[in-house]
Amino acid sequence: MLLYTTREKLELQSTPGNASSQIIFQDKLLTRGPDFAKNLKEAAIGFCKLYSQSKSLCLLVENSSYLSIWKEEFKKDAKSKQNKQTQKEKLATPTANPLQGNDLPVNLEFFARCQQELTELIGPIAAVICKETFYDNPGMKQIEFVKALAEEISCSGKAMEFEKRLLS
């Protein structure tokens, strides 16, 4: 679910959470996500829509000079943590194919990581490029997503470094 509000309204309707990057809003624990320039509102909305696909609350907050995202966090149970650890161990075994993990579909965490890395290389337009690439190619695997984004980097050396960071 995507909600839009202003910082002033959010301050009236929320309470601080356990950490400085957390708030409680409508009885839900929200964690601070990425910030977007106001002129990248569509990219921020796209990020929230992507996050909301997991049936989680995503709050888009308008501040005086930027937009911030607050996303719902869920407590992970012990079984979920154990499964995640087992998956990491399988990928870390010497016999595992190094590209095996990159054959997964693009998820929210991977999308955000790609956007962050691309922003460092080409600036804030990266948010728009990531969103367009994702929505123009539904079902894209992580390796395909990274290669498509790397094509947007004009310097081939930087493009190779981008791929290396995200695929290794």
Image: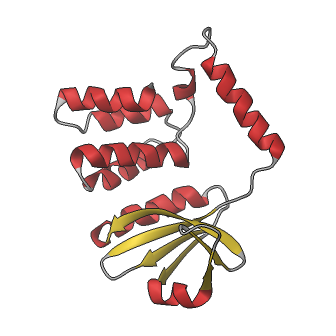
Work out which residue is located at the far front of the displayed protein and give it.
19
The residue under the point 22% across, 46% down is: 122
The residue under the point 33% across, 73% down is: 66
Relative height, residue 4 to residue 92 (above, below): below
Q: Is residue 133 left or right of residue 142?
A: left
Q: Position of residue 129 (x, y in %)?
A: 32, 49
Q: Position of residue 50 (x, y in %)?
A: 53, 56
Q: Foreground: 49 or 89?
A: 89
Q: Is residue 156 left or right of residue 19?
A: left
Q: Foreground: 22 or 145?
A: 22
| Quarter of the figure with the C terminus | top left
| Number of numbered markers | 0
Q: Position of residue 146 (x, y in %)?
A: 39, 34
Q: Position of residue 145 (x, y in %)?
A: 42, 36
Residue 152 is drawn in which quadrant? top left
Q: Foreground: 57 or 93?
A: 93
Relative height, residue 31 to residue 138 (above, below): below
Relative height, residue 100 to residue 36 (above, below): above
The residue under the point 47% across, 59% down is: 47
Q: Foreground: 95 or 104?
A: 95
Residue 162 is drawn in which quadrant? top left
Snapshot colouring: secondary structure
Work out which residue is located at the far left of the displayed protein and give it.
155
